Amino acid sequence: MTLFNIIKRVYKYIKLCMKAPFILVRGSRFSFTSIIEKDVYLRKSTIGKYCSIGMHGYYNRTTVGNYTSIAGGVTIGAMEHSHWALSTSTYLSNEGYDNRETIIGNDVWIGTQCVIRQGVKIGNGAVVGANSFVNKDIPPFAIVFGTPAKVYKYRFDEKTIKIIQESEYWLKSPSEAKQILITILDGNNK
């Protein structure tokens, strides 16, 4: 890593810390390589490396993998009103929060204004269309949208998905990951 890249990362980290009043981080962790916009509320959540998190988001007990991009206005794992309790009021019942973790895979794209329920798992490489309501697990590399979100199609054929999954490029630095993806693309074009 060059001195320039180190200075650039330190600058980005300082810039992120300066936004701290606008990013509510309660018991959460995030990588300084990720970009988190203003007015994002993180509660007991983890944001992976090289992610882009849009403004005005809410994340409760959410784990986000590396290289994931989430647009603004997304709500993940929010409190649900406890219709099964004697009262649905948050003043009278705290049953709306549970311990289910929502897991967003690596290199996932989630469009603006999506709502993702507590406990849902979204597979690596999935794409969630804008304004979707996700209440069930999404398989890797699926393209989903709607209310409730349904699988429209898959981004690649099964063989390519398997090759990509096995490469685990999301565990690498951007330059290494790009090289892996180029190798996969070259192998598929033969």
Image (cartoon, rainbow, N blue to C red):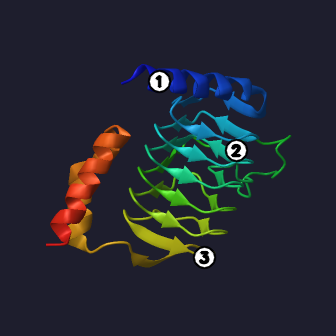
Nearest the eye: 4 or 34: 4
Residue type, numbered disc 3: Gly
What residue sits right under mark 2 in the picture? 95
Give above or below for 171 relative to 14.
Answer: below
For label 1, the SS is: helix
What residue sits right under mark 1 in the picture? 4
Q: Please indicate whether residue 163 sits to the left or right of residue 82 in the image.
A: left
Q: Earlier in the sequence, mark 1 or mark 3?
A: 1
Q: Please indicate whether residue 85 sits to the left or right of residue 46 in the image.
A: right
Q: Earlier in the sequence, mark 1 or mark 2?
A: 1
Q: Earlier in the sequence, mark 2 or mark 3?
A: 2
Quarter of the image for residue 115 reads bottom right
For label 2, the SS is: loop
Q: Residue 155 placed where, x, y %?
A: 37, 72
Q: Please indicate whether residue 156 sits to the left or right of residue 83 in the image.
A: left
Q: Nearer the viewer, mark 1 or mark 2?
A: 1
What residue sits right under mark 3 in the picture? 146
Nearest the eye: 177 or 78: 177
How much space separates mark 2 and mark 3, taking CA atoms?
28 Å
How much space separates mark 1 and mark 2, taking CA atoms?
49 Å
Nearest the eye: 178 or 143: 178
